[in-house]
Amino acid sequence: MSGEIILKFGHFDDENREYVIESPDTPLPWINYLGLEEMYGICSNTAGGYSFYKDARLRRITRYRYNNAPFDIGGRYLYLRDNDSGAFWSPSWQPVKTDLDSYECRHGLSYTTISSKYRGISSEMTYFIPLGETVEIWKTVIGNQTTKEVNLSLFSSVEFCLWDAQDDATNFQRNFSTGQVEVEDGVIYHKTEYRERRNHFAYFACSMPLAGFDTQRDEFLGKYRGFDKPLVVESGQSRNSIANGWAPHGSHHVLLNLKPGESKEVIFALGYFENDEQEKFDPPGSQIINKSHVRPVIDKWLNKDQVDLGFRQLKDYWNELLSVLQVQTPDADTNRMVNIWNAYQCMVTFNMSRSTSFYESGIGRGMGFRDSNQDLFGFVHMIPEKARQRIIDIASTQLETGGAYHQYQPLTKRGNNDIGSGFNDDPLWLILGVASYIKESGDLAILDALVPYDNKEGSEVPLYEHLVRSLNYTLERLGPHDLPLIGRADWNDCLNLNCFSTTPGEPFQTTENQSGGVAESVMIAGQFVLAAEELSAMAALRGNDAEESEFMKRAEQMTAAILEHGWDGKWFKRAYDFYSNPIGSSANSEGQIFIESQGMCIMAGVGIKSGQASIALESVNERLATEHGIVLQQPAYTRYYPELGEISSYPPGYKENAGIFCHTNPWIMISEAMCSNGDRAFDYYKRINPSKREAISEVHKCEPYVYSQMIAGKDAPTHGEAKNSWLSGTAALNFTAISQWILGIRPTYEGLIIDPVIPSSWTGFQATRKFRGTTYNITVEKEAGVSGRVTELIVDSVPVSGNIIPVGRPGNTVTVIAKIV
Ligand code: BGC
Ligand code: NOJ
């Protein structure tokens, strides 16, 4: 096999909405997310990953080892042992890594099924978290496809995390002495710190009678052994160990005697449970967990019919969510991403923000203020009510100055002091997040919802006031060119123009800034125009004419400042540094042109009428576009510039230093669509479309079903290689670009706009969109070779002027025909 180039590692099963991985040794672990509400899990294609309740840092249920080799060790593992021959293997390939006779992993929507065969024994595990529950199910079916009776042992294995993942990974002098478990009726309870300040515990249950169990990891593994060769599995004997300190673990041992052709189902249930403070112990006064409330939950989920029902409900739920937008275009990769995977990734980014993946440890970063606001763009159409709650949560962390904590912790929903504030784009994202919610839902009343500052009781004001403060925050921080001061950074976390760090290891984002500088951001200026126009529209809808025109005037002033001080001749400048020297200008020797200011200014409409937008987009095409996507800037920084910050700390072609930072590519797609360039918008869309890139999986390396944050740029030796899959604003922004701007089905305050800007070769497409309770069946018609905007709109056989469909009656189905002639 050596020398063979494997370009693909699986295929899409569109009908079942699954990605099917056909070989376990993918270039990197390809993961999926379990859970949609309170309990979550990350599950790789070899069953690696971990589970947590709400917050991957503060309520980690199972342990994961970071930066490991192999990359992916620690997971929800099963082992099978043939008790006649003594051979053992992992049906998910890892951790034993036996050369299985067959293997398949199907990552579906909030579930993963791994099936394999070895020496005539088939296994199939389906992992999922039922809706409304805090329990992870492993539905396991083991079959005998040989002609002889077999005697098997099935062992389960999870390593419990002592709740705080940060502490668990570092504080061994304490943690090796605190671990505690109970075992009752074959259920393993992990209760470290339950004696003292925790009311929660984890449990791990099995539907079959046990031949034994283990709860002390090192008894299970044996001395000097890893998960690839546990002593208990090798010997076929559980040790019935009880963890006192060290590493609490959960392992069941089930004996399976299977006749030829026979199969058996075994259910494992890994759960999280909280008791009331007053009812922690049974008997009261003892130190034993009161199990009276959890027992019914365990019994329920060890039942086969219940598990099947829970799984069906999960599938139905996803069918319903995805039915909000379904498209049929001439391009299969587009259909697959819009209809399934991009929407799915938007749900995951909404739930996780940037906290937990195989690249985000779950420890360092909670919910990002700017990130979570942007995540709304791709999520709000699926569950507007959840988006509403999220907006209230985010706005509740806003500071009275109008500024924002950069991050907040999902469990406590409190702003994170370690990271602090001063990222001057943050507050403006709140306006854009709220705008996307109101456009989708029509719920203007959210602007009257009372929301505190910094979660302080008594500080509540209407949400609308928060938005006004966001705008004023920028206006109160303008620099010498009347452009917004950048603060610690803007969208580009690594453009730290006030930091001047020369000490190794110092965090660029939180190190004390040098004072007295005047670093300004053209990106924030563009974003301000966009936000001011949105707030002006909201003011108008509230009948507040004075503020409507006030905010419009501010947008115009900022536009003028951009055109005067932010235009470089062929593109928009990026910023001015601490000393007021331009960045992203032909006057620079490196970093002459940046993507962000082009995208943000044009999305805000700056330069469209006057022609600068088209010139800037030409420059992007000439200087930044590559076959793998559009790089962030050019030329890449080849050395470290203390006055620029983290951006120049990356080697050329990676991350913010001229990597293809996928999040900003859709800004250019949207800009191209706004300038009526459907061919180019779609071409850029295709270049980073993961499904399209599946064919070069060996180069791309990350999952072909979701976007990655970054693809190495043309200055990198590994050009085309992706990193940081899953948690990126790329998901929401690409969803917005393709669905709202290229396909042009765009919610506005007044109703749904139909404004496709599609490739000239297409002859149209079809879509179903549910919007404010009405279902729209939309057909866009055009001849091949024609490009342009909609010229005729027919709604239920009646021609309508303009391109907005009047809001329909809830429950109705409306037929829409849009013609581009
Ligand atoms: C990374 C950025 C990221 C930031 C988050 C930086 O080190 O390069 O991509 O946004 O950290 O704080
Ligand atoms: C990732 C961060 O999560 C996001 O907030 C930021 O805009 C980009 N990196 C660019 O630095």
Image (tube, helix red, strand yellow):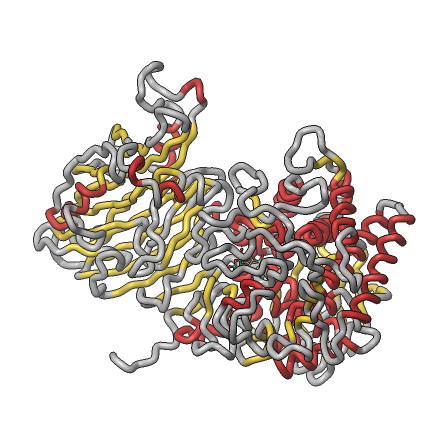
Position of the C terminus by quadrant: bottom right
Q: Residue at (84%, 67%) from the top-left corner?
A: 560
Q: Can see residue 241?
A: yes
Residue 707 can be seen, yes or no: no
Q: Quadrant of residue 499?
A: bottom right
- Identity of the residue drawn at 71% across and 72% down: 573
Give the image location of residue 726, x and y in percent. 49, 59
Residue 59 drawn at (x, y percent): 43, 39
Which residue is most to the right?
546
Foreground pick, 279 / 59: 59
Location of residue 734 with respect to 475 vertically, above or below: below
Question: Residue 213 at x, y = what percent?
Answer: 20, 37
Residue 809 lies, with reference to residue 242, above or below; the image says below
541 relative position to 525: left or right = right
At horizontal 16% and vertical 50% (from top left) the residue drawn is 224
Which is more toward the observer, 574 or 692? 574
Quadrant of the image occupied by residue 683 = bottom right
| Residue 615 picture location, percent across and down | 74, 80
Quarter of the image with the N terminus is bottom left
Viewer-nearest residue: 680 or 100: 680
